[in-house]
Image: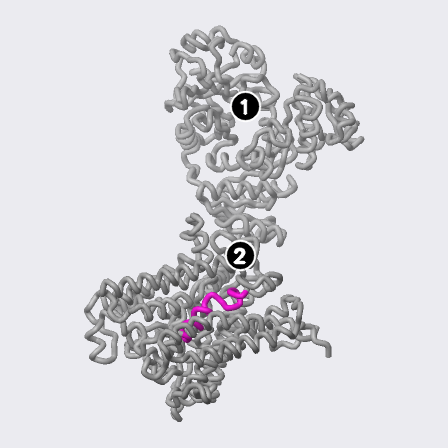
Amino acid sequence: MRILVIGAGEVGSSIAGSLADAHEIVVLDVDGDRVDSLTFEHDVLAIQGDGTSLDDLEAAEVEAADVVIASTDEDETNLVACGTVKTVSDAFTIARVEQPSFLRTWQRSRGVFGVDFMVCTDLLTAQAIVRIVGLPTARDVDPFANGLVQMAEFEVDADSPLAGQTVAEADTFDALTFAALVRDEEVVLPRGDTVIEADDQVVVIGRPDRVEAFAGAVSPEAETDVEDVVVVGGSTTAYQVARLLEERGLSPTLIEQDEARARELAEDLPKTTVLQHDATDRDFLEREHIGDADFVVSMLDSDEKNLLVALLSKRVGAARTVAVADNPQYVSLFQTVGVDVAVNPREVTAEDITRFTRERQAENVAIIEPEKAEVLEVEVGPESVLVGRPIREAVADLPAGFVIGAITRNGEFVTPRGDTVVEPNDHVVALVTNEAHDEVADQL
Amino acid sequence: MRLWVEWRASVSLVGTVVKWLSVPLLFPLALAAYYGDGVAVFAATIGIAFAAGWLLERLDDDPDLGSREAFLMVALTWLAVSAVGALPYLFEAHGIPGVVAGSPDSTLANPVNALFESMSGFTTTGATVMGNISFDHHSRALMMWRQVTQWLGGMGIVVLALAILPQLSVGGAQLMDAEAPGPGLEKLTPRIAQTARRLWGLYLGLTALEVVVLALAHEVELAPNMGLYNAVAHGFTTMPTGGFSPAARSIEAFSAVAQWIIIPFMVAAGTNFALFWHATVGDRHFLDDTEFRWYVGSLGVLTAVLAGLLFTGQVTDAENVGRVASAVEPALRHAAFQVAAIVTTTGYASMDFTLWGEPAKYLLFAMLFVGGSAGSTGGGIKIIRWIVVAKSVKRELFTTVHPDAVKPVRLGGRALDEKSVRGIHAFTLLYLGIVLVGTFLVALFGTHGGEPLTVFESLAATASTVGNVGPGFGFAGPMGSYLSFSAPAKLLMVAFMWVGRLEIFPVLVLLTRSYWTS
């Protein structure tokens, strides 16, 4: 496919970079320096120009593009760009916005502003964080099939009862499938006799209540009942996190240093206690008993501060910490030095955008380990190799590197076993390694 | 020194209102013609109102109303209509030479008393200085005029003027803001005149409903004394939370059924009329309104406590103990009636509560400070201000523990800006300050038939007139009157009623130098 990316900021470059392997990418940006650096960094065609100008879009051959992704830092620019594209092309347009109000408008009337799909970075990041708070011992949680199925990634540490068990021994939960183990950044597809080692990450797919029960089995000592959540920072994403927590019936605490912003947040968040202070002040953290928190979510404007706040909160006694890392390279580093979960908003955005640039059938995608494996949700058509015979037989015809985690049929959860027969229109949630990806996608 | 206020514009518009006051005066005139008593009194008043209004109107051909002029106009309007409203009392007492003889035994012959009665009427206070409340001493038309002044004053005479006079629509929001009770102005429709008409329409509808219900109760013999005259008279003074009654014993003169009928209408009168408007257009959100919930809740709690006190015999004299002690219905009825009457500042009485025990009496006294809802016809401090005060006290307690917490004061989910919170604190403090200073002044100048006042009498009379409630305690209780106060004390209370009805600031601002100059 030919994809035109408008805006080569952090998100645009990241999207361009992650799609460049499989697609023809054209990037349009007003900033000449960024255009130059992108040309050398990735195998893409970078052009200097304004995405809201029809002339510049035509210079980038917008008519030839199948997909246009507007991902500048300005919401209005992205919306105008999509609207402009639609005047000369019927390419599929994706707009990235920060303000959830635009997303709500778009959801009310799909296609408005000339946007075919809208991605709200702040909301996606906030949702990802709130899912992690809901499943405190998990590293990553993603919902599939309208929430009927959940994928979760847990870290097995040395004192977990799971360490040293085989998958067959650990698999005592119905409606739950062990989809993969991640060991030293490599994806291992588990068999019954695979031994789970300390520091492995286990990826499970199953019914949400079973996933929650499994979380308890991974670390029985950990407090799984989250009540006190502290959000550090007052960005739009932080606001969304607090709002989603309020929706779940919690009364979070939010710490914001700027007086006017703190007041604004306090007005918009009726159940949140807003504190106006510098969150890196240890005396303040102790005075406000941040150490008693079940979760501290640190989302300040710099990665370094986030790391500092997360570690400080741990030091004063907070049970678990989540830190936002804008630099994707910091994600694993943060987790190594003691932050429980690090979240990169661009990765979250990229996952969502990937959904529309990968094969048409895939409805929902979660990336397990970048470039290694992902979890897909597929609605199987009548011609799929899976239809009409037991899974055991069908899987034999498919390449290795493919694990069916869950099936939903007419809105009901079906636990996949060897003798389960897949029917047309079933939704299959499966883990696929990257080597097997293209072949599997073709045959499903 | 150059004045910054176009006072001619304000006075000219006051003239317009006074001129139009001759229209409602036609009602008692018609009654006077029907009963054959007092036609000349009202004909003379109408003539004077029309002429004086017309003359004042000439002061400015094209009045241009800014916010400063609005304050002056509202404040002066209430003084002017009270002065005109006192004329029938004076004419009846003194007679009109060569036309009709006076009734020299009328206590309203004294101009101070006539002004007090008129101001008490227009401000819906309901404190009376009428010596003999009976048709033997006053014409039925005059007694009805007292009721009419309350009805006109309830929803606001300026709001009424806004509703019908097109020349007031520019600057109307300021006028309504200056006059309508409660902090802030709620516009129901884009045009202020339309909002004013809707409010008056609702007010008229509720009044008519009460009149019909009371008259029907009379027809089926459940309310023996409540004939059409009395039904209309009480309809005119319930909805404005007024409190005047043509019966000397107030509502005690009527049956238990009549009392039960009046209670919900008093409660409705103390409710924000905007809520009724939302309800009539099919919006059920009024049930979620914070102020409405607190209002109904506090009425319920206070009624329960008071009913308990009455039921257990907290009454000082033997005759009344028998009426309420150990009797569920009367204890509940008198408690509910009196709570509604005092909290909404209506000021009716279903029995003489000055004979109740001290705890019950002090509870009623405290209720003088509660007041109705914002946007209702009730006076006092208003429930909404107490809610804000209570919530900001709660916030102070919270921020004592969490000094960095940022906690806006919320009303029904909406955060109030700090400016409004400050304004409400200032108002509440000022109100209480005026009551305290007023108590001192009343005690200083006031005597009661030559005798000094007790602390409680002086305090209650001040709180009752500033809050536009009506009855006080002691000799000025519900079955007594303000007649025996000295003239200076009565004039003070005329000022209290005026200041209280306009919620202090529109009057007080006129006393500042910066209002008149820069």
Looking at the picture, which amino acid does disc 2 mark?
Gln
Judging from the image, mark 2 belongs to the subunit labelled B
Instruction: Provide residue B119's location: percent of width, then percent of height.
Output: 47, 77
- Asked whether the viewer can see residue A401, the reply is yes
Residue at the image position 34 percent from the left and 64 percent from the top: B211
Name the one closer to the observer, B286 or B211: B211
Q: Is residue A399 above or below residue A351?
A: above
Q: Is residue B447 above or below residue A349?
A: below
Helix, strand or loop at label 1? It is: strand
Instruction: Provide residue B514's location: percent of width, then percent of height.
Output: 66, 74
Judging from the image, mark 1 belongs to the subunit labelled A
- Local packing at callout 2 (Cα closer than 10 Å; few below 14, some 14-19, many 20+) is some
Instruction: Quickly name the residue at label 2.
Output: B194
Looking at the picture, which amino acid does disc 1 mark?
Val
Q: Quadrant of residue A351?
A: top right
Which segment did they paint magenta? Answer: B145-161
Name the residue at the front extreme: B98
- Asked whether the viewer can see residue A155, the reply is no
- Local packing at callout 1 (Cα closer than 10 Å; few below 14, some 14-19, many 20+) is many
Viewed as shown, does residue A395 lie left or right of B175?
left
Instruction: Provide residue B186's location: percent of width, then percent of height.
Output: 52, 58
Residue at the image position 49 percent from the left and 72 percent from the top: B501
